[in-house]
Image (cartoon, rainbow, N blue to C red):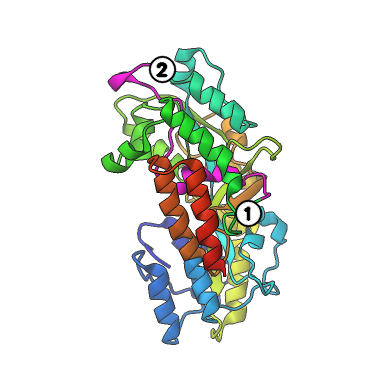
Amino acid sequence: MWDKESTPYWQAMADGYMASHKDVTIEMVDLGSSDYMTVLATQLAGSADLDIVTIKDIPGYANLINLDYLKPLNEVLTRDTGDFNGTIEQLTTDDGNFYAVPFRSDFWVLYYNKDLFDKAGVEYPSNDLTMEDYDALARKMTSGSGDTKVYGCHYHTWRSAASLFSILDGKNTIIDGKYDFMKPTYDMVIAQQKDGICMDYGYLKTSSLHYSAAFENQQCAMVNMGSWFISTLEAYMKDAETKFNWGIVKYPHPAGAEAGSTLGTVTSLAINADSPKAEAAADFINWCVSEEGAQAIAKTGTFPACGSAATAEIIKSTEGFPEDSNSVDALTTSNVYLEMPYTQYASDIETILNAEHDAIMTMSETVDEGIQNMNDQVPAVLG
């Protein structure tokens, strides 16, 4: 694992398990967050005495599988895979096995400034917002000019923030090598940028303006971002000179997609293929994704991979969480699509898509040109 001292759920998981398993001692090995997956692979290559390993990202996960360092967990996991909102399937490899089990899941929601909506006399966004509704709302909420301008929406410079609305109907993935399905989303975002509905991507890149600053400074009425931003906002509002009311709703989705369909990232647990304590390791993993384990994780302000009414209640009880029912309901997802599902080519695909995203968003390429380049380059990687 990494960043033990600054990440409270590690100790909470270990302590929670040991409290009900008195004969077990869990020793944590902190490899640091910098190049974690590379360092982990090196440790495993040297037959390190590690039983359970934490998976930080998909390219690193794919590499460990290719090196035969991980144990298949299909016969190990006792919880129904359906409880993971589709993420297990997205971690499953071509051989039909999955080699890691998510215990933590961050999913994307839409944050909005209630005070700005009230001032504009515009109804708050709902928990069933189509892309067309979202675009219209962003346009309606854009006002002013210069330093006092309020943008209707805001897209951080990550590719996921602008392009991945397109995968939420479940019909396409970003690892198939065909990207025409992204055109409506890119067309919408570029039109918003040209019309001044969102900030210019080039400006955001050169200024390094953080999404939190844009929202906290009330420069935008809405921002789409991961659930990790909730605790950031709660902490900010405690000491902010200018406080404002905010809320969240479920992520905007294409027409025909189920409300609550959203993007996600997972942090997972795996078992070293050479572990002599694989049975005990499996028991720990199953505890972490049980209701007891999920609640222990939620109490640290972290979203467990298998959420429930009880874990949602724990999260919403944190100081500063919005009190409206829509914000509470937004904590429940229906389908979670990983920003990068498993593929052995994840790293190469990521490089191509990021480069083309940058070209499209800076308008050095048209949407059609960028998508064609994706269509040409990714299949060459896939072979």
Pick whichever, 258 or 358, lies toward us: 358
Which picture quadrant has residue 296?
bottom right
Image x and y of residue 42, in percent = 40, 80
- 79 in magenta: no
**Please, is residue 35 above or below residue 48 in the view?**
above
**Please, is residue 38 above or below residue 46 in the view?**
above
Which picture quadrant has residue 175?
bottom right
Image x and y of residue 45, in percent = 44, 84
Image x and y of residue 180, in percent = 59, 47
Which picture quadrant has residue 109?
top right
- 152 in magenta: yes
Which residue corresponds to the image point at 70% horizontal and 74% vertical from the top-left? 75
Single out the mark in the foreground, 2 or 1: 2
Pick whichever, 248 or 11, lies toward us: 248
Q: Dividing the image into 4 quarters, which one contains the N terminus?
A: bottom left
- Crowdedness near tag 2: few (<14), some (14–19) or many (≥20) residues, C-alpha within 10 Å: some
Q: Which residues are magenta?
A: 144-171
Q: Is residue 83 left or right of residue 298?
A: right
Task: Read off the residue under disc 1.
Answer: 306
Image x and y of residue 137, in percent = 54, 23
**Sequence order check, earlier mark of 2 and 1:** 2
Q: Secondary structure at mark 1?
A: loop
Which residue corresponds to the image point at 49% horizontal and 22% vertical from the top-left? 139
**Please, is residue 27 above or below residue 47 in the view?**
above
Query: Amino acid type of disc 1?
Result: Cys
Work out whether residue 87 can be spotted. yes
Q: Is residue 178 left or right of residue 80?
A: left
Total label count? 2
Which residue corresponds to the image point at 51% horizontal and 81% vertical from the top-left? 67
Task: Please give the label number shown on residue 143.
Answer: 2
- Crowdedness near tag 1: few (<14), some (14–19) or many (≥20) residues, C-alpha within 10 Å: many
